[in-house]
Amino acid sequence: MNPAILDEAPRDPGVRVTHHSYTDQDFEGHRAHTVYVGLHVPGYHRRSHHRRHRHHHKNGHKKREDGTSAEYPSELHRPVTPPAERVHFILGEDEDGSHESHPLFSEMEELHYEGDEMEWRETARWIKFEEDVEEGGNRWSKPHVATISLHSLFELRSCILNGTVMLDLEASNLDQISDLVLENIVNAGHLQLESRDRIKEALLRRHRHQHERKHDKVDKSSRLPLIRSLADIGRNSSKNMFGSSSSAPNTAAQDSIVKSPSCSSLNLGASCQQSGQNSHNLGEISNNSTSSADLQHRLNQAFMKKIPPGAEASNILVGEVDFLDRAIIAFVRLSQATNLGDLTEVPVPTRFLFILLGPSGNLGRYHEIGRAMATLMSDEVFHDVAYKAKSRQDLLAGVDEFLDAVTVLPPGAWDPSIRIEPPQQLPSQESRKKTETQEVKIDEEEEEEKEREESGLKRSGRLFGGLINDVKRKRPWYLSDFTDALALQSIASIFFLYFACLTPIITFGGLLGDATGERIAAIESLLSGAICGILYGLFSGQPLTILGSTGPVLVFETILFDFCRDNDLEYLPLRLWIGLWTTLILLILVAFDASALVCYITRFTEENFATLISFIFIYKSVEKVLDIGHYNPLMSPITPYPGQCLCTAPNDTSLESSGDFKWYNLNSSACVFYNGTMEGPGCISTYPDIYLFSIILYASTFSIAVFLKEFKFTPFFPTKIRCTISDFAVVIAILLMTVADVLMGLNTPKLQVPAKFQPTWHGRGWLIPFFGEKNPWWTAIATILPALLATILIFMDQQITAVIINRHENKLKKGCGYHLDLFVLAILIAVCSILGLPWFVAATVLAMTHVNSLRMESECSAPGEKPQFLVGLSVLFTSVLQHIPMPVLYGVFLYMGVSSLKGSQLFDRMLIMFMPQKYQPDYVFLRSVPTRRVHVFTLIQLTCLAILWIIKSYKPTSIGFPLMLVVMIGVRKLLDFVFTQRIKRFWMM
């Protein structure tokens, strides 16, 4: 084939008529998989796409003896590469880094007339979604999905096909860019030389952005004459530079730009012959007519925080003028992103320019073409193509690939004026960037092996190999754990989790004190929370996991204390040996990478465990509020007292000698005033206001926390204020309800914090002896058996919570650390056993709440600060904490339980069971799995959840709860015989 043909721009038969008309052949070409608007784009010789182009193969490969097609001339019927494959080739080419893609901010401006003066006015902008200046001209629209007409896309394709395309242009200001672009258009014969200066004058007019409209009256009188003089300077300079006809353009820098012949008859077309940078010495004439300080003032610094770091600008300039008889079009990519003064409303360098100026009467068409261009630049795939394109054909391939992927809505079924709200989650575009051959099906075992290796769950094959790998993975992020803690959202999380951690620690301490005869109680729990929280946060692999008290550990401690009491053994020394053996066993598990067994804990087991703990938090919070009613019951005022309640005189009263003083006539307040006592069967101390107000505090705390947490999604107040209120939602709710309780003055139950730092039981110290006075030496060996059970309890509680925290959905940036976490936990158990403190392991709901409180909507990494240090200081500000009502903290428990259910697929499927099909949400698994099979799987999971709840709630069997989690893993394996691999993949079982 003639090489000249490959270098030639393809011809579009449809544009030989008027530029806005298309033949049936054009639209038939678009309906096929390969969209070329009625023509074939030259491509590389690739194998044919049998699945979608079978109709081309019947005749297309019958060759004559001369090598041409049997039906078409060889010049028109050539092997064609689909645009998607061409785009994949463009994106896959090795680059030297000069065409690295950056985030793009696109801004469209239109040429506006005010009397005899012209200026560019901003009409729309794009980051990811489109924002338009409303018709009133004084406000921005809400961001919305850009909707463009198919006709404007075809017109844009024709513009790129026939207009000026200049890639890697060397220019430093808008004046140079204008000279180079106009030089190409004039040399191609599509612009009269006498119109060149007027076009340049229009391009150099001032740019007025939406945020500076309020300064119009102040700026208009002072700046327009200066702009006019600037245009005069540019006109005089152009006459000196281009007055000679012998000034031939230097095309060395534009060798990759192809020519498209027969462009003279196109109304939309401008210069089809491209040239590079002019070799003449261009004057450094800046289009910036203001000082740098004034320019900085005029740029939209407030909007700059919305722009991603490292972003570049794409400027679209469209307009109509009365001295042109045909449109001129130019697509420019600068070799280096350059700040072009006030061309862009934000101080980001410009990389792309798209210029469209045409005759009067078609501004609506030009506007839509400009919107189409900006929408393409905001598209993830075309955006990369625009950066890496080496020729006009590369850009056309990007447009055609976009047309292949675009969705067309019928005009009779949808109103284009309706703005589509941005989706909550953007769809991935990776499938458009990869060819079908690249999407090789990976064996399921290989995929699981890769995931294990990324999460550190692959056996290293050497002693402590997994621990060493976790330390290496943690080391680069260690310093950032401290710097990220200074973020405002981290500070809010610290205060929220302080109250969230403190309440269960004190509650657990009270329960443990009752179960162990006060050997271990509230003050010991506080000290354990401080030590474990600080050391685990400093040295663990995943500091987002929060250590706390758990039910199985409480049951284990209760059984152990009862055993010691029945056998006349000392509890704390025996517990010390169990803790030391547990530490040794855990260290052995760490040495042999036993945490790799975590890979068998799938989403099925995770969701059962996490949902159960969330339900328990909700249930316990309601139960605790109802318990307040037992001590302060409600009593109807019309209910008579069952007996008399009379005031009796104290023994040492001087009024007793007074014969006329009737004590039994005194009411309760007068009786108390005279130090008397109300006695009798009818004396029932009831305070109904306390119970009712406790319910109000409980419900209000939960409601305020939920409302303020979602406040950042409301349209009120600036973004910074909304996000700050959302971050401190729980803390604000606690403060408001505590103030309300103080103002009411009711004796509601308050948080009881130990006032002194000393052991609760006077018969013990802070260091536990190995045997004490009663325990024989053989107890050190006999405790191995209970230590094995304790190891199972701790290992399962810790690792299941770690798996939940390290889910892919949380998008954690700092990696996992299963082996390092278990190593640190083993050391902490030994420390707590020596000091006689309760054992703390990973608390599921607290850890999930920690992750949710630090979750950010942006792409920056979640901080990993440590909030548990304040727990150890709780004794120092007891007077403050004692004012916090317990119903308020119960409301926080309810919030934690409910918020932990958010995003749980099991909970979503539970709700689906009660919805008619037409009202069910559009979940991915509902598209591919029959609804009946979804319900069957949900019922199986709910049955397992109910069994876990029963075992955990029944005291004699609760010690075996972690063992039942192992059984859940076996149940999950049995489901392989019930559900196909395809269904399990959708549920990520």
Image (spheres, rainbow, N blue to C red):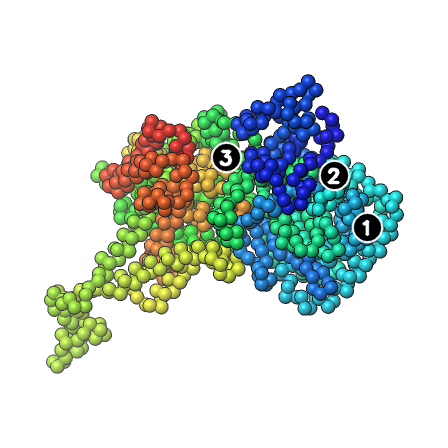
Disc on the earlier residue, 1 or 3: 1
Task: Residue 334 in the image: state x and y as whole percent.
Answer: 72, 44
Residue 225 numbered tag: none
Instruction: Specify few, some or many for label 3: CA neighbours under 10 Å numbering under 14, 14-19, or 20 or more.
Output: many
Label whose residue precedes the other's in the sequence (1 or 2): 1
Give how far across and how far down residue 375 sits, in percent. Answer: 59, 47
Single out the mark in the foreground, 1 or 2. 2
- Of the pair 178 and 471, the residue shown nearer to us: 178
* SS under mark 1: helix
Q: Looking at the picture, how far across and down is residue 509, in whole percent?
A: 32, 49
Q: Nearer the viewer, mark 3 or mark 2?
A: 2
Residue that numbered label 1 is attached to: 193
Mark 2 residue type: Ser
In the image, what residue type sits under mark 1? Leu
| Residue hosting label 2 | 262
Instruction: Report the residue marked by disc 3.
Output: 470
Q: CA distance from mark 3 to mark 2?
A: 66 Å
Q: CA distance from mark 1 to mark 3?
A: 70 Å
Q: Secondary structure at mark 2?
A: loop
Task: State yes or no: discs 3 and 2 in contact (Cβ < 8 Å).
Answer: no
Residue at 41 percent across and 30 percent down: it is 982
Residue type highlighted by circle 3 = Asp
Instruction: Say which label, 3 or 2, has the lower sequence index.
Output: 2
**Is residue 537 shown above or below 678?**
above
The residue at the point 32 percent across, 41 percent down is 553
